[in-house]
Amino acid sequence: MDVLGNRGKCAGPCRLPYELLENDKKINSGYLLSTKDLCGLDFIPSLIKSGVKCLKIEGRMKSSKYVATVTRIYRKYIDLALSNKEFVVDKKDRKDLIQIFNRGMSSSRTLR
């Protein structure tokens, strides 16, 4: 799995409203891809198993330290998910992600 960035060339599809369908039935709608401090670490094993080959890190208008921290932590857990070791997210890594760039919005996941 690669961790790539487009360095600000994104057209902003994450900021648009969507409808989530299951068997052609709407089960949710709204700004489902909101960029407010989403943390997907816990979902990495499932994403890999489902066939995801690439992740986009929200790095537009962020510092190089932000991009480096997010990339380092996601790379660590992608490698862990691909190994035969138990997948456990370290509390410090989760805290580092939440603290590296928080625009005052709450995280979708609480610190454990």
Image (tube, rainbow, N blue to C red):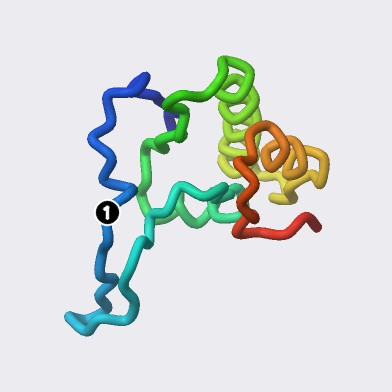
Residue 4: % across, % down: 40, 25
Q: Is residue 29 or residue 39 the one in the foreground?
A: 29
Residue at image location 56% in from the left, 40% down from the top: 82
Q: Is residue 11 above or below residue 111?
A: above
Residue 51: % across, % down: 36, 49
* Residue tagged 1: 16
Q: Kindly identify the amino acid type of the residue bearing the numbered disc 1.
A: Leu
Secondary structure category for the residue under label 1: loop
Q: Is residue 57 above or below residue 48?
A: above
Quadrant for the C terminus, please. Answer: bottom right
Res. 78 image quadrant: top right
Residue 19: % across, % down: 25, 70
Q: Is residue 30 or residue 97 the one in the foreground?
A: 30
Horizontal relation, residue 92 to residue 25: left or right: right
Horizontal relation, residue 87 to residue 36: left or right: right
Res. 79 image quadrant: top right
Residue at the extreme front of the image, as rendered: 104
Q: Is residue 110 or residue 82 the one in the foreground?
A: 110
Residue at image location 60% in from the left, 30% down from the top: 70
Residue at the extreme left of the image, as rendered: 24
Quadrant for the N terminus, please. Answer: top left
Q: Is residue 98 above or below residue 109?
A: above
Residue 95: % across, % down: 77, 42
